[in-house]
Image: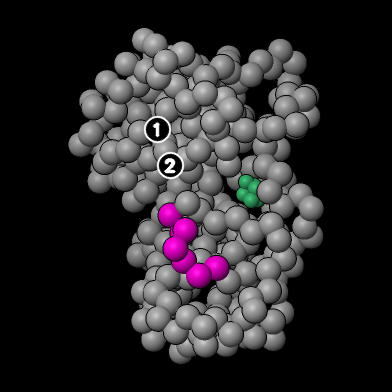
């Protein structure tokens, strides 16, 4: 049996992938809006445990084509450790087509393009990275631990190495008053990164709303669903990403959109405008949202 230190999270697009837990928790674990790994102390999983998992999985599912390395930032592992994992996966799964992982912006800065290229050649294909915003003040307030310039630098290294980037931003992070500048500065950063995949999520805090508000400074006011959709519209309007597969269909969003930017921008803006004409009828109800 595969051993997991739960809870284990994966991107929606990894629903059919084999999940191997290369690390436990998140090495940063400091983002004010994120509670996914708060109960875990970050640690790389010992090689012996991982090797046992790989051997077991290879026996059970020898035709595996996709593997996602959990937890919150498996890309934090050193290049030699990732190399060892990727080589073991290639040996164990002859049909393997892609290996993916979450990476924090900080992780991307710990490896140079040449190291990333070697990992790409060994089968690592996609990195999922939450930049959340391009607003430097907001990034500091939410404890992201990286500036827009650092994020652009790390993402450029990955792209130059041939790794595909799947980037997320979070609507609603800046509340009502910061909404438009969050959207515009995020678009500015994304235009520098030029990701292949881009997803917008919407802030969900559950029982942690008061704690988030208290860290965001005096006068912070949460945005409402229509504000978040207007923010989405401003983001889409300002994006200059070419051949970028854009999604806001994550369950946290009030409005699900899908398209390729820039090609589909006018259609997406039309859908946003329609939704804002009748928010009560066209936006996902609060009870329907989830993570
Ligand atoms: S880097 Fe990602 S997983 Fe880690 S605390 Fe921030 S949002 Fe959560």
Q: Which mark is residue 199?
A: 2
Asked if residue 16 is among those painted magenta in the image, a careful observer would answer yes
Question: Compared with residue 92, is residue 196 higher up or lower down, i.e. above or below?
Answer: above
Q: Position of residue 200 (x, y in %)?
A: 46, 37
**Residue 155 appears in view:** no
Residue 29 in view here: yes
Q: Which mark is residue 120?
A: none
Q: Residues within 10 Å of mark 2 (few under 14, many from 20)?
A: some
Residue at screen point 27% across, 21% down: 270
Residue at position x 64%, y 86% in the image:
52
In front of the other: label 1 or label 2? Answer: 1
What is the quadrant of the C terminus in the image? Answer: top right
Outermost left residue: 263
Q: What is the number of callouts on the image?
A: 2
Q: Position of residue 82 (x, y in %)?
A: 55, 76
Mark number displayed over residue 256: 1
Q: Secondary structure at mark 2?
A: strand
Q: Is the shortest distance between ligand 1 and the CB of mark 2 under 8 Å? A: no
Cβ of mark 1 under 8 Å from ligand 1: the answer is no
In the figure, 177 relative to 102: above or below?
above
Q: Earlier in the sequence, mark 1 or mark 2?
A: 2
Are circles 1 and 2 on residues that touch, CB within 8 Å?
no
Whether 288 is drawn above or below 90: the answer is: above
In x, y percent, where is residue 241? 30, 40
Above or below 109: residue 52: below
Magenta-highlighted residues: 13-19
Nearer to the camera, 17 or 119 = 17
Pointer 1: residues within 10 angstroms few (<14), some, or many (20+)? some
Quarter of image, res 261: top left
Q: Residue at x 52, y 63 (%)?
A: 101
């Amino acid at each position: 049996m595969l051993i997991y230190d739960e809870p284990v999270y994966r991107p929606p697009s990894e629903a059919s992938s084999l999940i191997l837990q290369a690390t436990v928790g998140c090495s940063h674990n400091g983002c004010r809006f994120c509670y996914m790994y708060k109960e875990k102390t970050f640690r790389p999983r010992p090689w012996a445990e991982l090797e046992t998992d790989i051997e077991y999985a290879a026996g059970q599912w020898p035709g595996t084509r996709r593997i996602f390395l959990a937890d919150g930032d498996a890309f934090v592992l050193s290049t030699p450790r990732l190399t060892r994992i990727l080589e073991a996966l290639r040996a164990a799964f002859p049909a393997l087509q892609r290996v993916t992982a979450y990476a924090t912006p900080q992780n991307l800065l710990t490896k140079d393009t040449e190291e990333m290229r070697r990992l790409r050649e060994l089968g690592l294909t996609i990195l999922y990275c939450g930049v959340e915003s391009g607003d430097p003040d907001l990034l500091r307030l939410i404890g992201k631990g990286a500036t827009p310039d650092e994020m652009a630098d790390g993402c450029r290294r990955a792209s130059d190495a041939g790794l595909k980037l799947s980037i997320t931003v979070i609507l609603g992070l800046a509340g009502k008053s910061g909404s438009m500048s969050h959207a515009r500065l995020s678009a500015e950063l994304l235009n520098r990164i030029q990701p292949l995949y881009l997803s917008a999520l919407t802030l969900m805090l559950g029982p942690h709303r008061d704690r988030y508000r208290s860290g965001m400074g005096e006068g912070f006011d949460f945005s409402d669903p229509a504000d978040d959709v207007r923010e989405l519209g401003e983001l889409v309007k300002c994006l200059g990403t070419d051949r970028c597969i854009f999604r806001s269909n994550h369950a946290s969003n009030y409005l699900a959109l899908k398209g390729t930017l820039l090609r589909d921008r006018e259609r997406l803006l039309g859908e946003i405008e329609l939704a804002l004409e009748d928010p009560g009828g066209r936006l996902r109800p609060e009870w329907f949202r989830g993570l």
